[in-house]
Amino acid sequence: MRDDILLSVKNLNKKFFDTEVIKDISFTLKKGQKAALIGPDGSGKTTLLRLISGLMLSDNACKNKDDKSILIDNLSPNTDLLKIKKIIGYMPQTFGLYEDLTVEENLKLYAGLKNVKKEEQNELFETLLNFSGLTNFKDRISGALSGGMKQKLGLSCTLLSRPKLLLLDEPSVGVDPVSRRDLIQITDKLSNENNIGIIWATSYLDEAKFFDKAILLKEGKKIYDGTPNNAKKVMEGLVFHVNPKNQDKRELLDLIVKNEKGISDAIIEGDKIRVVFENKEAIKFFKYEKEEIEPIFEDFVMCALGGRNPAFYTTTIKPKTNPIDIPYIEANGLSKIYKTKNGEFKAADNITFKVSRGEIFGLLGPNGAGKSTTFKMLIGLIKSSGGNSKIMGFDIKENPLEAKKNFGYMAQKFSLFGNLSVRQNIDFFRGVYSIKENKKEEIQKIIEGMELDRYLDKNASSLPLGFKQRLALLCATIHNPPVLFLDEPTSGVDPISRREFWMRINELTKHKTTVLITTHFMDEAQFCDRIALVYKGKILITDTPDNLKNSVKSEKLKNPTMEDAFIEIIKKAN
Amino acid sequence: MLKEKYGALFSLIKKEFYSVWRDKKTRSVIFLPPILQLFIFSYAATLDIQNIKIGVLNRDNTEISREFIRQIKSSRYFTKIYNLKNENELKRAMDEEKIRVAVYINNDFTKKYKAKNNPDILIITDGRHTNASQIIGGYISEIASSFTLMGQKKKNSIIEFETKDRFNTNLNYHWFIVACLTGILPMTTVVLLSSLSLAREKEMGTFDELIVVPLKPVEIITGKVIIPLLFGILDGIIILILAILFFKIPYQGSFILYVLSLALFLLSVVGIGLFISSWAKTQQQAMLYVFIFMFPAIMLSGYTTPIENITPKALQYLTVLNPLRFFLVISKGIILKNMNLYYVSLNLIPIIIISIITLIGAGRAFRGKLE
């Protein structure tokens, strides 16, 4: 074994009862190397990390005590677990922070658990707090931290044992782009300065570019292992922009996805449509004018994972009302003021915007910036302290029932009634929206189109995540609302299901459904017609994605991404 | 028309029913614990004092004093008699809780008895068991007085007692307990179901869904009230049936009046449950609040202690806030003595007032949470 190799995984297998979750995986990680572990839900990311950390034994290790399919610093988890525990740090998806303790108390607790000597503790805490930027928050109750800060604290606690190998399971889920970038920079610095090897599992594909290598899993198999750059090269000549010109971009996207063959991915990017072909052959048959562009890592992943699910565009829920000539969503000086010990806290301050028929409007912003508060005030989940919100002209405070009949709402984590069956969930929403019996057939068709029919009698909580999302969308649109509110609708969902979801949304907007969405995914932000960036309770700017990107163009940033735009605008506001 | 007007509410009620019924754990909470508790309470929690162990220190040791001891022995309360030799032995037996009570007969007992000069005996009881000691002391005094009377044979000056216990001729303690349990056990179910249902929705995030769909707050509250209420009434009826069939309680009153009173009583409990759950963020918190509510509610209901005996007096006034206090009067009244509508309604009025207050309170707290 070469000296610079920290981790070697060789022909690793893991079966749960009869299902193989890890199929013959091999790879190596050098000292100080950073790897992104990418794959859809259920592809085996978490299992792989748990096997490496010794929390679980592989199939071979169960049979053979001397099995060496996993070696960390030449130690095997099934023989030298105690030694290995000292050199690895594992941060699970939900790190067990004690939410009632302060940041410092959490560190102390974990330092005690990890046998860090008392006299070393203070110095170590200082370094870690500095590192993670939490120094000013060390007396804050950790339950009151934002999602990003919690992850940084979790990371700090994991680092207490000064590991050589750091295993992070989806540390960036639910974390806003600014904090995500922070978190990545922290780990970057870690691996450079202390020569720590890092495996970072994620479903945010755009994160891969920050890593030395990317390992792509699909159904328990490794399908790619190499640098993100090499992956991009594979895709060269296969990625194009199509300019819709006079045609409606959403209609065009629909046409391309439905009628063209050999396309692995097609999404809206600002004013254009990004089309990724499966191979060179397919390009020849493509009948629209196109312009070649530089591929990105996501293109490769979408292609490698098998592209779009072909059977997903059969929903035909159309908004019912005839078009009227008013803004479909209207926020007029919405404010929310909380009284605190030291006076007032303005969670939202004079938020004003209008969304017209058929528009997709995005609310973006870091965690705790006030976008959730705004979102909740708009639909009446929180009462505003000032200003008003109107949906289809109905004031949510004064005429809540009429307003509520006119919009659908899909909550984060798809809050469905878990111990009701799929059918009972649908019946509930059908009932509360007083939907006529004669619509039953139409709904049945949609159920079949969403492939929910085989789950009808299963509990909603037992559905795979992607299907939960479909059910949530069906329930939210069952009354054909002209307006749809989506609160981080794709959080924690894998890339393939996310694409599928957006094709459904695209179909809805084709029928002129008005959509308001919050998201942390920048590729989803590109899908919006207009974006409002919320920061510190105020709207910084409202504009189209393309204009936002162009506004931050500079010598240094010649080709800014949506994420760059987001981060730059926030920086400027500070 | 009816369907159009109440269709949404009906869907909500159906949903509430399913979410209780389809969850195995919740479903079993409705039926298993009440039935189990019915049996445990009615067998274990008896206030009758029986099977008493008694020590006797007889300094007199004559035919007459031995006859007195025989009288004690033959009474149904005492199962075991220890003959003690001296004071030390008496002290030890009591310390070790071998005996609950000791009778000390002085050596002048026979002399005084014969001289008709009021012979005295000393009864020593274990004060650690306040209530039991009092009762046992009473038993022995009763035996002693009838014993002396028998010797004195002054028939003409004696007032003869004849006690008749109405409604429960044999003072069967089960009857009292089971009649009380028909109120207490459904109350437990209802307060649990109603307080957990909102808290669960908050935990799962489905509470937001309820707010966002076009339901009026009144409809949401109604939906939340009905299912726990129905399950509570069902519980009450099951317990009543078991009481009649299994515990052979001579059911006296009107069944309809009973169910009506039970429903009104449980309505007030649902109000309390919903009030609790509007404050609780998680099911765990709701559970905790339920316990904080349950103990005082039972203690201040007249079930364990008659309300007139509660001191300080302020606590007695507090019981008027407790719907269980009024319902126990009704349930005992209807079940054991066919209480009539007039007296039932006297107790129903405070229950109705409490229901209105708690439901309005719950509704307000619930709407307050929307803001």
Image (cartoon, coloured by chain):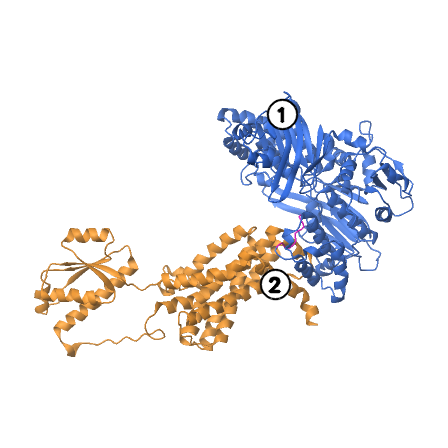
Chain colours: A blue, B orange
Nearer-the-camera pick, A168 or A397: A168
Q: Is residue A157 left or right of residue B138?
A: right
The quadrant in which the N terminus of chain A is found is top right
Chain containing the residue with disc 1: A
Stretch in magenta: A413-418
Graded by Cα atoms within 10 Å as few (under 14), some (14 to 19) or many (20 or more), the crowding at tag 1 reads many
Q: Does B150 appear above or below A349?
A: below
The dominant secondary structure in magenta is loop
Graded by Cα atoms within 10 Å as few (under 14), some (14 to 19) or many (20 or more), the crowding at tag 2 reads many
Q: Give the structural element (helix, strand or loop) at label 1.
A: strand
Q: Does A454 appear above or below B255?
A: above
- Which residue lies at the image location 77% right of the left edge and 32% below the top edge? A231
Looking at the rendered structure, the kind of residue marked 1 is: Leu
Q: What's the distance in space between the residues labelled 1 and 2, CA to CA?
A: 60 Å
- Which residue lies at the image location 56% right of the left edge and 60% below the top edge? B361
The residue indicated by pointer 2 is B223
Q: Is residue B77 visible?
A: yes
The residue indicated by pointer 1 is A6
Nearer-the-camera pick, A36 or A355: A36
Q: In the rendered image, which quarter is residue A280 located in? A: top right
